[in-house]
Amino acid sequence: MLKRLNQTLSKLIDHELRTAQLLFLFLAVGFTAFTFFGDNLPVKGPLKHEWLNGIDALTAFVIFVGLLFYKPLQKRYQQCAYVFMYTMNVVNIFLLYGTSFNIQYAYQFIVAYTISGWFFRDKKNWLIHMVVMNVLLIIVTLVSEKSTATTFDFYATYIVASFAQAVLIHFRFSIEEKLTVSEKMYRLLAENSFDLICIHNADGSLEFISPSIKRLLGYDPAELVGRKPYEIIHTDDREIVRALNLSVPNHPSIQHPSQYRLQHKNGTYVWVETIFIALEGSDGIKNTVLSQSRDIRRSKGIQLQLEERTKELERSNADLETFAFVSSHDMQEPLRMISNYMQLLKKRYGGKLDKDADEYIEFANKGAIHLQQLIRDLLSYSRITRTELKRVSVNMNEAIDEVLRNIQVEIREKNAKVNREQLCAVEVDRNLLMLVIQNLILNGIKYNHSANPEIKISCAKHDRETIFCFADNGIGIKPEYQQRIFEPFHRLHTKAEIGGTGLGLSISKKIIERLGGRIWLESEFEKGSKFFFSLPNS
Ligand code: ADP
């Protein structure tokens, strides 16, 4: 109830013209009452007491009517107040003279004079008023006959009141001055900002729009003041702004930046990014919203282009993978047949034809085996993104034991040793992880000239990820090749030197990235390599 009364009063007082009109009506009625019903003390000179109050009543009434119906005067209500203050104070001084400083008029003058100071809006006008009234007062004091006691009483009160008025007015002007300076600064900021700054009413309509709107959207601020911003938001984006729930007071003070399109006056659309901030009124209630919008056409254009290209790349990548998958899958069968017949040829005719024929059969056989391996790798490579991930808790120790069982022939052949410490468990796709482990162990053995190849597997658990390390005492890799070996078909040796398809590490990289981790290596040429991969902790 009190809050509502306060709000109504603030609204009324904030509307200065309406307040001025009410004030003059009140004064007109008040002085008319004094004219007809006031004390009729004798006054020196031709003008009677009621006439003098009548002058005040008439002045207030004329100004009230003027302010009500005459538009040019409405803009000058401040000057009207000055006219009334002068009239009232001059009449009061005349009453002082006319009643020889009668106590009733003395206090009437002091009260009216003190209050009237508040109606002056600048120091200059206030000073002029003060000088005029004091000169009149001195003249009146000099020409009227009165007792010393009365004069002393009057001047004592008058000096105190004048001093109080001067102090209060000084404070008021200095506060107003500071306010004007800071208001000017903020206005300059808002008006010259490159961004579009708006203030929205509680109902969402625009109350203030910075002039930068002209540059951004081609409108003059006046064209949009009072309108709702929805009118110029792209229909597809209206929901984004509605979802912000700008209807105060419930929404949070600062909203995350939202991106949407605003319609330019010429009909085109402009991408902007806006931050909305709820502002509290002096009563602590959020009743306005400040929005700051930035033109993001350039970055949005680049972002859209990038998204389009990414989509295109993803599409062509998927096509390529499908192609690799289908072709390698379909090639498997005829290749198996070739390989089988080559074996048969070797078995049946090996040593029965001439030496060249034996050599040719051997080459064809090796080629068929290599091609089979290549197709198997290609299939695994293209399957990585096609298969659905089955995340399970994987005991790394058990997974490594299983891999070691699968490759025991290779381990025995090279007299290799695989050492591992107690390893941490992870939650990933077990089959894919086993493929990585197998590739890394086999490489550690294959690219190793030591009589006793050795691979050490360790792990380190961090806050967000677990890192595994596969360290070997192999041939190592020169720094300039360390990144390239993760690319498909990138090999550092010929097939004759060390066999392989050049896909093992790229398969491993693709798997680890699909599982949400990274893979990298540290290596010293001819001393050994350490392959690391990380997996996110669940
Ligand atoms: P492949 O072994 O089939 O050739 P990879 O992708 O597994 O294919 O390896 C790519 C290349 O990286 C290999 O040709 C080899 O030169 C090098 N490489 C891989 N692992 C090691 C290792 N542990 N030590 C030294 N070189 C290695």
Image (cartoon, rainbow, N blue to C red):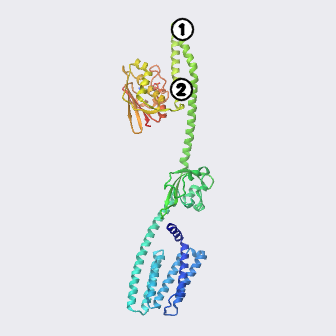
Q: Nearer the viewer, residue 238 or 137?
A: 238
- Residue 46 seen: yes
Instruction: Residue at 52% x, 15% y: name it.
Output: 365
**Outermost residue, top direction?**
352
Question: Tag 1: residue type?
Answer: Arg
Residue for badge 2 = 379
Q: Where's residue 504, x and y in %?
A: 47, 26
Q: Quadrant of residue 534?
A: top left
Judged from the image, the secondary structure of the residue bearing numbered disc 2 is helix
- Residue 270 seen: no
Q: Quadrant of residue 147?
A: bottom left
Q: Where's residue 256, x and y in %?
A: 50, 51
Query: Quick check: which quadrant has ligand 1?
Result: top left
Q: Is 465 situated left or right of 22 in this image?
A: left
Residue for badge 1 = 348
Judged from the image, the secondary structure of the residue bearing numbered disc 1 is helix
| Tag 2–tag 1 contact (CB < 8 Å) | no
